[in-house]
Image: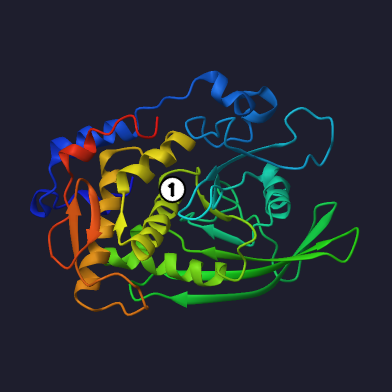
Amino acid sequence: MISNASSDIKEKAFHWPLLERQYKLVTSFRAKDFNVVSALKPCNKGKNRSLNLIPLESHRVHITPRTPGIDGSDYINATFLPGFNLLKEFIITQHPVEETFADFWQMVWDHNAQTIVVLTSVINEKEFPQFWPDKEDDCDYGSFKVKLTEENSIIQDSGGYITTRDFIMQSTQDDYELTCRVVHCPGWPETCGPLNNVFDLVKIVQTWHLEYQNGPIIVMDRYGGTEAATFCCLTTLYKQLNFEDCVDVYMYAKLYHLRRPGIWRSQDDYLFLYRAIESLVSTLNLGEISDGSPFGSQLNVNNGLISTNGHAVKINISSEHSLKSDSLA
């Protein structure tokens, strides 16, 4: 659970009964067994860290089977999520188990995914092992090799750190190469300090990804759940705010749940999205961010949409917007 969200709800003028009502609408969809056929196959069950977070058949990521004809060999626990611009802007996935290391890199290779965000808080050999090669070692996965070329760390003001690792994936059959970067920010967003700092990682990833937009951004946490979904959602809302002068938290939270049920575990996870946007807006009002954003200095709320019109107000939950239960069903 993302814990930052719940400490001073009453002080922030959020209407808790309406938030609760809205959260129930956001998470109302429940997957049936026929929605997750591939994930529940006996040959694939061991590839899932948790059966509470598995891909729907309609939105799962397929990979090229390394052994054609073997049942389940195209399966990986990963789901496509839409962003602000693209229907498949993100791939949300779990930290690979050892037997799926090759599957993970196959997914990167197949889908030209040159940006990988890792939010796993602890990398240890037993539970969440390192899935990338060290600099002195190459990993050979048959049709391609993976080589680490550079590693750098950034110490954040909050005391946390971001490590970037650049890799070259080289075909073993021709001279094709794919460059990709792993951005590792362990414990995000818990380690960010002030709430508006959660967008620092969003901006770092977007800056890198601007040059490599031919494929989706892979976002990973331990189980492919709340932290990864929060990163995807805040990235999308940040873009929406820049381009449309408004954000619709409800719409994207529900849309993402429809794609990967189980990502929101509590109302606190949902409220965190509102709180993060509120914090970003407050920072903008104070003039502390100067990044060429086209939106105005202050925001207004109308029917659940936070929009800019030059009038400073608090972010709240609109009763009208909370009743839009069928808009994404």
Q: Residue at x 13, y 57 (%)?
A: 314
User: Which is more toward the observer, 9 or 101?
Assistant: 9
- Amino acid found under the numbered disc labelled 1: Ala
> Circle 1 sits in a helix, a strand or a loop, which is it?
helix
Q: Position of residue 123 (x, y in %)?
A: 54, 56
Q: Is residue 9 above or below residue 213?
A: above
User: Which is more toward the observer, 79 or 128?
Assistant: 79
Q: Position of residue 270 (x, y in %)?
A: 29, 44
Q: Is residue 188 visible?
A: no
Q: Residue at x 45, y 53 (%)?
A: 232
Q: Position of residue 127 (x, y in %)?
A: 55, 46
Q: Is residue 259 above or below residue 82?
A: above
Q: How is the image coloured?
A: rainbow
Q: Is residue 174 left or right of residue 78?
A: right
Q: Residue at x 24, y 65 (%)?
A: 281
Task: Identify the image quadrant of residue 130.
Answer: bottom right
Q: Is residue 319 above or below residue 9?
A: above
- In the picture, the quarter occupied by the C terminus is top left
Q: Is residue 123 left or right of residue 99?
A: left
User: Which is more toward the observer, 63 or 317?
Assistant: 317
Q: Is residue 66 visible?
A: yes
Q: Residue at x 16, y 38 (%)?
A: 319
Q: Is residue 309 left or right of residue 165?
A: left
User: Which is more toward the observer, 227 or 232?
Assistant: 232
Q: Position of residue 97 (x, y in %)?
A: 62, 44
**Which residue position holds label 1?**
229
- In the picture, the quarter occupied by the N terminus is top left
Crowd tier of the residue under label 1, counting other residues whose Cα lies within 10 Å: few below 14, some 14–19, many 20 or above: many
Task: Identify the image quadrant of residue 131.
Answer: bottom right
Q: How many marks?
A: 1
